[in-house]
Image (cartoon, grey):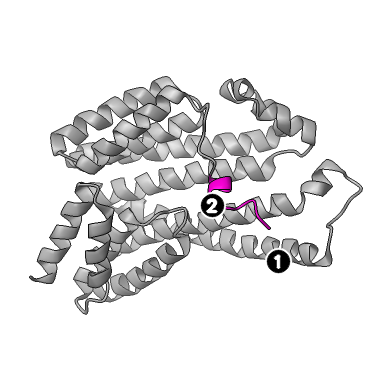
Amino acid sequence: MSEEQDLKRARDFIAENNKDQSSKILWGLYQSHNLKIKLDTILSLLVILDHFTENEKLLEIIEEGLKITSILKDKGIETYLLTEKCNFLLNKIGFMIYRQKNLKLSANVFKWIGFSTEREKNEFETIIQQRKEKEQEIQKLEIIISDFIKDSKNHYFNGNISLRLGDFYSSKFLNDQLDLMMGGKIRSKIGNIYFIRKWNLDKWLLYKNEDRKKIKGDWNKCVYFFKLAISNFKSGGHDTEMAHAYYNFAIKYKLVFQFRKARKLLERAQELAEKCNEKRLLSQIVLFRKELTDRNKNIRNYVEEYGLDLP
């Protein structure tokens, strides 16, 4: 069987939500000497790899993909990969922020206590420098990506890049919420009460005015880029991509307790997914609809699940 046929089989398995079978084929194709096949393989791996637990692996294959796009002179895919790189670098920053908060927990609660050990102090200072480097790298990439969108007339690329920029600003929204949160044991407990968060009262309790504006700006950019992605996919007649955009947009609204908007977007995603026979997406929609019914009362605890609370 040819590599082209293997790649098609892998994509069919992805559409059927069969991650194990698609993964076996794709990692085999990743060794291909055919640059076009290898690049398409990388794009497929970006779909099936876990963005939370396999962040480092994703960054590695993106760098490999960027080398290929440089040789093939494919500016569209290169910009898309740079957008993905922004997202995965931001994931790393998110882990750094969480670790910083853990290291400074005692100082936030009891102002007269500093770091418990010299090692923790050094680690905290190292994270500050690493964050600065990653944030500067992201800023440079954002300029390149923005310039491409302004000049490009390709609805497919513009839609996919805008979609991932929407994801980027959603992650930044969450990162900044954690990073800018004011300390204090009692304040934090009150701010995390379900109904306080549901009615967005935590923003007034946990953040300074200028920090609230920054967080709101993140959210506004997230919404803007998702709408831009949907508009591009609609103009280009890319129904499958539009279905995924609606689904991901619905997830973002669930994060901010806007369940009615999330349901409307999910309905549109399902209509398009059924039209395009997107089995994988349809199975995800079924699971997400159950989460919407729960209305964020039992949010998945990634920190505990992946042992991130351990030293």
Residue 36's image quarter?
bottom left
Quarter of the C terminus within the rendering: bottom right
Q: What's drawn in magenta, residue-wise? A: 302-311
Residue beneath the point at 36% across and 46% down: 162
- Regarding mark 2 in the picture, which secondary structure is present there? loop
Residue 128, above or below 270: below
The reply, left or right, for residue 141 in relation to residue 24 is right
Provide the residue designation for mark 1. Answer: 126
Judge whether 9 appears above or below 112 on screen: below
- Residue 304 shown in magenta: yes
x, y percent for residue 265: 33, 27
Q: Quadrant of the N terminus?
A: bottom left
Single out the residue that lies furthest toward the left.
1
Front residue of this view, candidates 225 and 121 = 121
Q: Are marks 1 and 2 in contact (CB under 8 Å)?
A: no
- Up-down relation of residue 35 to residue 272 (above or below): below
Other residues around mark 2 within 10 Å, as few (<14) / some (14–19) / many (≥20)? few
Identify the amino acid type marked 2. Answer: Tyr
Q: Name the residue rendered at 24%, 30% in the picture.
A: 270
- Please name the residue that numbered disc 2 is placed on: 306
Q: Earlier in the sequence, mark 1 or mark 2?
A: 1
Q: Where's residue 31, x and y in %?
A: 26, 76
Residue 64 in the image: above or below residue 288: below
- Residue 141, percent from left and from top: 46, 60
The residue lying furthest to the right in this view is: 112
For the question of whether residue 246 can be seen, the reply is no
